[in-house]
Image (cartoon, grey):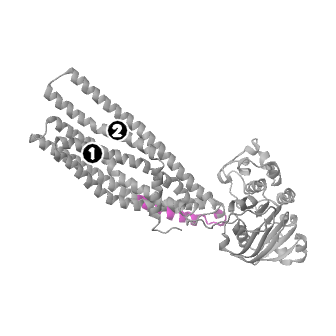
Amino acid sequence: MTTDTQRPREGAAILRTALRRNIGAMAWGTLLMGLYQAGETAFPIALGLIVEHTMRDGRSLQALALSIGALAVIITTVSLSWRFGMRILQKANTTEAHRWRVKVAACGLQPVARDVDLKSGEVLTIATEDADQTADIIEVVPLLISSLVAVLVAAVALGLADIRLGLLVIVGTVAILSILSVMSKRIGSSTQEQQARVARAGAKVADLITGLRPLHGFGGNHAAFRSYRKVSTEAKHQSITVAKVNGAYAGTALGLNAVLAGAVTLTAGWLAFEGRITIGELVMAVGLAQFIMEPLKLFSEMPKYVMIARASAERMALVLSAPPVMTPGSGHPSPGGDLELDCVRHGTLTDLTFQVKAGEFVAIAPYSPRAAADLAAVLAMRVPPAAYEGTVRIGGRELADLSVEAVREHMLVNPYDGEIFAGTLRTNIDPSGTSRTVPEAVEASMLTDVVALHREGLDYGVSDRGANLSGGQRQRLSLARALAADSDVLVLHDPTTAVDAVTEQLIARNVAKLRRGRTTIVITSSPAFLDAADRVLVLDDGVIAAEDTHRNLLANDEAYCQAVAR
C-alpha cells in the first residue's frame, strides 16, 4: 500500500498526465474560449465607443451601419467560439475519462491483484465518478485561462479610461480569489470524504446483491438492510455537508463578484460626475461591470473544481499506484499436466502433500468446506506463494517461478460460485469466441436442456449475474465454460452442488469422458464425481488422510462413508 504522504503526489501526477496528453485539444479550446471571453468583454467596450462617437460626431447613417456591423461580428465571434471551443473540450474530457475508467478496470482484471483495501463497489465508484471528475481538469484549465483573459481585457479597457478603475478590477479579483482559495481547500477534503462514503455504500449494495438469496435463506436480510441503511445515511450526511460547503462557496463568490461589479459601477459614476471620464466611457464601465460578472464567476469557481479533480485523482491513485499482491515469475510450465503440492500450509491446510500425474482424473474429498476453499485459493493463485509455506509445482516447476498468465493458460481453477455475465449462453461459455469444443462442453455439462428450451438456442439472452437462470442452470453454464476452455489442467470446485442427483451422475460421467487423457481435479463431496474419478484423496484436518478408489473407501473407511453418503 502507498502511504498517505505519497498519495497527493500520485494524484497530482495523474492530473499532469491528463493535461499532458490533451495539450493539443486544450490549446485549441483555450484559444476559442479566450476568443469567446474577449468577445463578451468587447461588447460593452464597443457600445461605449459607439456612444462616444455618436455624441462627438453627431448622427450618421454610415457610422450607424458600421457600428451595427461591428456588433454583429462580435456576436458571431462569441457564438461560434463558444460552440466549437466547448465541443473540443468536452470531447477531450469524455475521452480522457474513458481512458481512466479503462485503466482502473484493467487493474481489477489483471492476473495479479493489487494490494488495495477496497471492495469491488468502491473500485466501481472510482472507475466512474472519480474518473469523470478527474477528467474535468481538461475543461477547468482552459476556462480558467479564458476567464483570466476576460478579466485582464476588462481591466486594461477600464484602466485606459481611468487608472483607478483598472486597479480596482485587478485588486478586487486578487482579493476574491484569495478568499475563495481558502474555502476551496475545505471543499476538496469534504468531497474526498463524501466520495469515500458513497463508495462504501456502493460496495455494500454489491455485497447485498451477491448474497441476497442466502440472506433470505437464514433470515439475515433485515440485519443486512440495516447495515446498508447505516452506511447510506453516513454518505447522505456527508453529501449534505458538501452541499452546504458548495453553497457557501457559491454564495460567497456571487456576493464578492457583485460587490466588485457594484464598486466599479459606482466609481465610474463618480468619475463621470467629476468629469474625469466621458459619457461613453461611463457606458463602457457600466457594461463591463455587468459583463465581468460571468468571467469572474467562472474564474472564482475554478479553484473549487481543481480541488475536486485532485481529490478524485488521489482516490484513483489508491488503485493505480497500489503495488501488486505478489511479484510473479516469468517462466512457463513444462508440457503435460503434472500437479504436485509439497507440505503446503495455509489456513486450514496444515501439511498438505499429494501429486496428480498427467492425464489422471482425481477427486479430492474435503471433510471441511473451509479446507476446500483454502486449497482452491492456493491453486487459483488468489493466495501469493509467499503467503503460504510449502511448494506447489506445475509441470515440475514451482508456482512462484511461473508467470501468472502462463499458469492461467496451463491450468484453470473454476470456482464453485463462478460469475455469470450479461450476454448470451454462447458468450458466457466462450467469451473470446475461439473455443472449438463448445458443443462438447454443452453436452458434457448437461446444458442441452437449457439450450433446447429456447428458440434462440445458445444465443438465448442471459441477464446480469444470470438472474433469469436457476441455480442449477448457472452452475452448469459455469461448468460448460470451464470445459470449453480445454486447459491442460482443470480444477473444479463443487461444480454440481445445485444440480439434482440424476443430472449430477450424468455430468460426472460426461466430464470424465470428455477430459480423458488430460489432468482433471475435482474438489467435491459428490458421490457421482468421487465414483467417476480414478482415485480419491481424502482431505481431513489439513492433510491427505486416505487415498483409494471411491468404492474401496466406502467399504473400508467409516468416516469417509459418513462424510460423502447422501
Q: Residue 436: image x %, image y %?
A: 79, 48
Front-most of residues 170 and 184: 170
The majority secondary structure of the magenta stretch comes to helix
Callout 1, which amino acid? Answer: Leu
**Which residue carries the number 2 mark?**
36
Magenta stretch: residue 232 in it?
yes
Q: Residue at x 23, y 36 (%)?
A: 45
Q: Which residues are magenta?
A: 215-240
Viewer-side label of 2, 1: 1
Of helix, strand and loop, which one carries label 1? helix
Relative to 180, 464 lies left or right: right
Magenta stretch: residue 559 in it?
no
Q: Earlier in the sequence, mark 2 or mark 1?
A: 2
Q: Can you name the residue that lies furthest to the front here? A: 331
Q: Residue at x 87, y 59 (%)?
A: 516
Distance from disc 2 to disc 1, alpha carbons, whole Å, reads 14 Å
Tell me: residue 420, above or below residue 550: above
Q: Residue at x 21, y 37 (%)?
A: 284
Relative to 76, 172 lies left or right: left
**Which residue carries the number 1 mark?**
152
**Image quadrant assignment for residue 404:** bottom right
Tell me: residue 533, above or below residue 170: below
Mark seen at residue 4: none
